[in-house]
């Protein structure tokens, strides 16, 4: 059993081994935990405080450093995970803290209607590369970096699936793609074959200089979409939200959305519940007999 004094170092080591983090993300975890130690004393878990004491500590840090709602939420999630790990390792006898903070300002997420997607995606001014990226975003709901990291072997056209590595946890998920997307990707990958790029380990998407596409290049592609398709706002996460919304609106379960989008925490997926409410309201209006 771990001792209370080495639990922080062991937790950060555990995160490195079991849920690979980028260097700057690992530093963020360490910084947030250091601040909680500073705010709550020598050890924030010994003795265990009340939920409200932990919340007050996070609010105090947020006020001191003028954090946004997203930063406050991130600190809360990190500390929740730290507490769960300490409980699993039997350093403490119960989970000490549950996140209650919202990720942002409570606004509804932005998503494409089908008409907007067809206007954005099926545009003669865009290249086949743009088209391929658009339909993969639409079908798979990948994060921006997850699409950038795709290699040619990650797309299995025969089985109709895309292998996606979660950039936050390193876990692998397999996202299905539609028959239309399978056909388009077959055409796109044939083009890569003509260029001699269809080899295992090669990027799926390239820049104009035949290097792997990066964030700035992808941002330029998406900005070009906005220039052509004004006034529709286009960004990678909007496709992701659209997939989550479509699944729930068509009767899919929230847990299904969690798996397809690769969320670790079901609370993150709950932002899509308003689609379910809208669907329920529509079904009630169509099928339930009300007073007239």
Image (tube, rainbow, N blue to C red):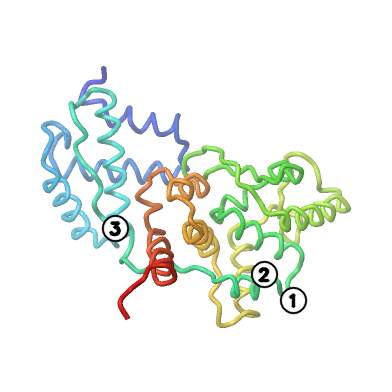
Question: Which residue occupies the extreme top position in the image?
Answer: 1
Report helix, strand or loop for mark 1: loop
Q: Dot 3 corresponds to which residue? A: 102
**Is mark 2 in CB contact (under 8 Å) with mark 3?**
no
Residue 99 at x, y = what percent?
25, 48
Indicate the quadrant containing the C terminus: top left, top right, bottom left or bottom right. Answer: bottom left
How many residues crowd around disc 2 within 10 Å: few (fewer than 14), some, or many (20 or more)?
Answer: many
Mark 3 vs mark 1, CA separation in Å: 40 Å
In the shown orientation, is residue 184 left or right of residue 101? right
Examine the image and state in which quarter residue 65 appears.
bottom left
Examine the image and state in which quarter residue 217 appears.
bottom right
Q: Dot 1 corresponds to which residue? A: 125
Q: Nearer the viewer, mark 2 or mark 1?
A: 2
Q: State the residue at coordinates (81%, 48%).
A: 197
Mark 2 vs mark 1, CA separation in Å: 10 Å
Q: Dot 2 corresponds to which residue? A: 121
Image vertical order of residue 248 relative to residue 283, above or below: above
Residue 275 at x, y = what percent?
42, 63
Image vertical order of residue 221 relative to residue 151, above or below: below
Question: Which residue occupies the extreme right position in the image?
Answer: 194
How many residues crowd around disc 3 within 10 Å: few (fewer than 14), some, or many (20 or more)?
Answer: some
């Amino acid at each position: 059993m771990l001792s209370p004094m080495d639990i922080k170092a062991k937790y950060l080591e555990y995160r490195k081994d079991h849920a690979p983090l980028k260097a700057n993300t690992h530093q963020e975890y360490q910084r947030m935990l250091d601040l909680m130690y500073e705010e709550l004393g020598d050890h924030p878990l010994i003795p265990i405080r009340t939920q409200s004491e932990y919340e007050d500590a996070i609010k105090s840090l947020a006020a001191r450093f003028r954090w946004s709602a997203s930063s406050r939420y991130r600190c809360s999630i990190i500390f929740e995970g730290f507490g769960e790990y300490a409980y699993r390792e039997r350093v403490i006898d119960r989970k000490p803290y549950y996140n209650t903070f919202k990720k942002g300002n409570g606004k509804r997420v932005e998503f494409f209607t089908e008409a907007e997607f067809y206007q954005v995606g099926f545009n003669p001014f865009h290249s086949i590369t743009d088209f391929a990226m658009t339909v993969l975003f639409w079908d798979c709901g990948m994060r921006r970096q997850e699409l950038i990291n795709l290699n040619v072997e990650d797309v299995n056209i025969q089985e109709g699936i895309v292998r996606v590595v979660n950039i936050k946890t390193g876990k692998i998920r397999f996202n299905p793609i539609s028959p239309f997307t399978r056909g388009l990707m077959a055409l796109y990958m044939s083009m890569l074959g003509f260029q001699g790029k269809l080899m295992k380990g090669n990027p799926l998407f390239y820049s104009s200089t035949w290097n792997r596409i990066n964030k700035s290049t992808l941002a330029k592609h998406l900005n070009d979409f906005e220039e052509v398709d004004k006034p529709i706002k286009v960004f990678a996460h909007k496709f992701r939200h659209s997939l989550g919304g479509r699944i729930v609106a068509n009767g899919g379960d929230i847990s299904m959305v969690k798996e397809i989008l690769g969320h670790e925490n079901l609370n993150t997926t709950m932002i899509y519940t308003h689609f379910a409410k809208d669907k329920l309201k529509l079904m009630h209006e169509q099928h339930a007999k009300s007073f007239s």
